Image (cartoon, grey):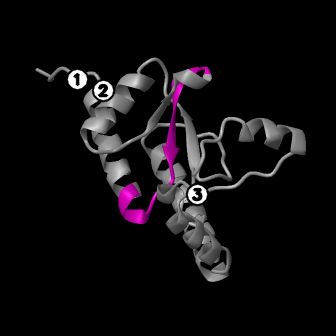
């Protein structure tokens, strides 16, 4: 919600024992000074956070509604992504969308080989996703023989 993923900024809260174990895996100097400065500034920008949360809510709902119109069944979500069962062609659909410049994640590595993860993006990014998804799903429909 702070828009700092590109700077590789995030934080975690946990039991001290767990945090100590996680710190063993952390590389030295893993956050840049620029990233730290941006993170500190972002913490004070409550209006940006409010707008980000609201845009995510609106765009998540729009994606959910439009993907349902395409015949998909996103799992209800309160996050910044949608989990969508696709079936056996999940991985090939992700590959096909990637050729259109749209990145969605196949979830086989998480034990869900027939599902994908779609991150909620900006309105323009989501429109591009919906267009590419519509085309990809249309190409997968079996051809209907012409009537004589």
Task: Give residue 126's mark.
Answer: none
Q: Earlier in the sequence, mark 3 or mark 1?
A: 3
Quadrant of residue 15 within the rendered picture: top right
> Is 97 displayed left or right of 52 in the figure?
left
CB under 8 Å between discs 3 and 2: no
Instruction: Locate residue 122, reporting x and y percent.
Output: 44, 63
Judged from the image, the secondary structure of the residue bearing numbered disc 1 is loop
Identify which residue is drawn at 83% across, 38% down: 18
Between tags 3 and 1, which lies in front? Answer: 3
Q: Is residue 115 magenta?
A: yes
User: Which quarter of the rendered picture does the C terminus lie within?
Assistant: top left
> Mark 1 sits on what residue?
144
Q: Position of residue 124 (x, y in %)?
A: 36, 63
- In the image, which disc is placed on residue 141? 2
For the point 61% across and 74% down, which residue is it?
42
Identify the residue at image location x=69%, y=55%.
11
Packing grade of label 1 (10 A; few <14, some 14-19, many >=20) is: few
The dot on residue 9 is 3
In the image, the segment drawn in magenta is: 111-125
- The alpha-carbon separation of the residues under discs 3 and 2 comes to 42 Å
Residue 7 drawn in magenta? no
Q: Position of residue 133 (x, y in %)?
A: 35, 41
């Amino acid at each position: 919600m702070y828009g700092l993923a590109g700077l590789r900024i995030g934080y975690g809260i946990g039991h001290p024992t767990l945090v100590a174990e996680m710190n063993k895996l952390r590389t030295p100097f893993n956050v840049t000074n620029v990233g730290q400065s941006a993170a500190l500034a972002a913490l004070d920008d409550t209006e940006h956070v409010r707008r980000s949360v609201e845009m995510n809510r609106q765009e998540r709902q729009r994606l959910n509604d439009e993907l349902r119109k395409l015949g998909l069944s996103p799992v209800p979500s309160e996050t910044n992504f949608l989990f969508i069962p696709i079936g056996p062609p999940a991985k090939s659909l992700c590959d096909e969308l990637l050729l259109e410049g749209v990145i969605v994640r196949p979830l086989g590595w998480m034990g869900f080989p027939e599902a994908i993860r779609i991150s909620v993006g900006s309105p323009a990014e989501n429109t591009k996703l919906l267009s590419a998804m519509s085309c990809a799903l249309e190409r997968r429909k079996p051809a209907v023989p012409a009537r004589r």
